[in-house]
């Protein structure tokens, strides 16, 4: 199974953690897939490079790339990473070089918004733009389907998603009391709160 299969988008006029997606004539997200984590961490784009169409209006200054789970206009980036800034004007295209499509990723875990989940080949940080789950070498939104909201406006979480998040939490906890009085730890497979020493 691929590490990720979805869409690559361009972010403009800001750092990777907050930049917004490009807009303008000729711009569209490009389908992309990344290979399984072959050595336990590295994933490569199935395509050696990725090109975006010709701009019929200015797209702005591209400062970051982002991965999206789908191609709907309301979807938010899963992760983003900075690239060398480049303005895309009318009549130009934007090609993503191979070094930006070679990623070193954490093997397992739950990552909160703005947390670094890995790096590009050249060391640029991959920043989670929403809660991300990496489980069995596959990256997905931690709360898939959370675009539908309840009447209170809060995101929903399925039982399966909750089980996955709790499993990842339990796997990441220490098995001895850290002694700080606030941290969680795993005490004989039971979730416990630390006792202050």
Image (cartoon, rainbow, N blue to C red):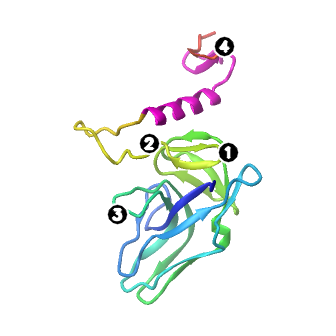
> How far apart are the two marked residues, 3 and 2, measured between alpha carbons?
18 Å
Q: Find residue 141 and report its horizontal and vertical position in percent.
A: 48, 47
Circle 3 is placed at which residue position? Answer: 73
Counting other residues with Cα less than 10 Å from the Cα at mark 4, is it few (<14), some (14-19), or many (20 or more)?
few
Q: In the drawing, what numbered circle is on residue 143?
A: 2
Pointers 4 and 1 in contact (CB under 8 A)? Answer: no
Residue found at x 63% / y 17%:
189
Circle 1 is placed at which residue position? Answer: 107
Counting other residues with Cα less than 10 Å from the Cα at mark 2, is it few (<14), some (14-19), or many (20 or more)?
some
Q: Earlier in the sequence, mark 4 or mark 1?
A: 1
Q: Is residue 135 left or right of residue 80?
A: right
> How far apart are the two marked residues, 4 and 2, measured between alpha carbons?
28 Å
The secondary element bearing badge 2 is classed as loop
Which residue ends up furthest to the left in the rendered image? 151
The secondary element bearing badge 1 is classed as loop
> How far apart are the two marked residues, 4 and 1, measured between alpha carbons?
25 Å
Tell me which segment is drawn in magenta.
Answer: 159-187
Specify the quadrant of the image occupied by residue 49: bottom right
Circle 4 is placed at which residue position? Answer: 188
Q: Earlier in the sequence, mark 3 or mark 2?
A: 3
> How far apart are the two marked residues, 3 and 1, measured between alpha carbons?
30 Å
Q: Find residue 173 and report its horizontal and vertical position in percent.
A: 63, 26
Residue found at x 49% / y 42%:
142
Pointers 3 and 4 in contact (CB under 8 A)? Answer: no
Specify the quadrant of the image occupied by residue 71: bottom left
Which residue ends up furthest to the right in the rendered image? 39
Quadrant containing the N terminus is bottom right
């Amino acid at each position: 199974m691929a590490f990720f299969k979805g869409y690559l988008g361009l972010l403009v006029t800001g750092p990777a953690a907050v930049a917004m997606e490009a807009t303008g004539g000729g711009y569209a997200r490009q389908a992309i897939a990344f290979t399984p984590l072959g050595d336990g961490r590295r994933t490569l784009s199935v395509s050696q490079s990725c090109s975006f169409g010709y701009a019929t209006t200015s797209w702005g200054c591209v400062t970051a790339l982002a991965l999206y789970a789908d191609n709907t206009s309301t979807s938010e980036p899963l992760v983003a990473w900075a690239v060398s800034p480049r303005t895309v004007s009318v009549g130009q295209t934007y090609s993503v070089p191979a070094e930006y499509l070679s990623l070193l990723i954490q093997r397992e875990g739950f990552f909160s918004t703005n947390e670094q989940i890995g790096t590009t080949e050249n060391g640029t940080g991959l920043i989670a733009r929403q809660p991300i789950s990496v489980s069995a070498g596959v990256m997905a939104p931690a709360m898939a389907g959370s675009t539908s909201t309840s009447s209170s406006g809060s995101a929903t979480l399925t039982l399966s998603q909750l089980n996955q998040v709790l499993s990842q939490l339990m796997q990441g906890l220490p098995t001895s009391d850290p002694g700080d009085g606030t941290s969680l730890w795993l005490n004989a497979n039971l979730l416990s709160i630390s006792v202050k020493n």
